Image: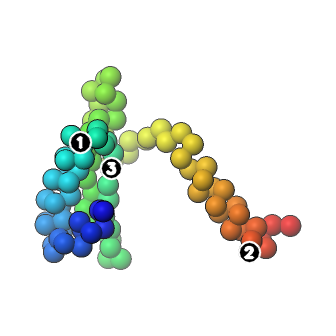
Amino acid sequence: MLLAFVSIAQSPGDIDQRLSEYLEIQHRRMGFAGIVMIASSDGQVVEKKVGLASIELDVPIRANTKFKIASMTKSFTAFLVTLSEHEGKFS
């Protein structure tokens, strides 16, 4: 959905504004909190932060905020191990 949203925008300023609006809506609707970066082959286009890193301590999200992602990366690791095994990189 975000890709369709970005393809409508024409300039980095337009992308910045539309992304801010979209993230605020998602923050209000479902409590989304995080960092979204849209980049091109030329480099970073726009980075937006929304929400809090810690609700209890009222700490805002910063560019270097570390998120607890639990077991989310296990599926990526399993995929890469399986792919590497399929390519014969393990013996």
Say above or below: 57 vs 10: above
| Of pointers 3 and 1, the one earlier in the residue sequence | 1
Scheme by which the image is coloured: rainbow
Q: Secondary structure at mark 1?
A: helix
Q: Quadrant of the C terminus?
A: bottom right
Mark linked to residue 29: 1
Q: Are marks 2 and 3 in contact (CB under 8 Å)?
A: no
- Quarter occupied by residue 90: bottom right
Towards the viewer: 53 or 79: 79
Residue of label 3: 35
Q: Secondary structure at mark 2?
A: loop
Q: Secondary structure at mark 3?
A: strand
Please name which of the two marks, 2 or 3, marks the residue nearer to the observer: 2
Towards the viewer: 55 or 65: 55
| Of pointers 2 and 3, the one earlier in the residue sequence | 3
Residue at 59% from the left image edge and 57% from the top image edge:
76
Residue of label 2: 87
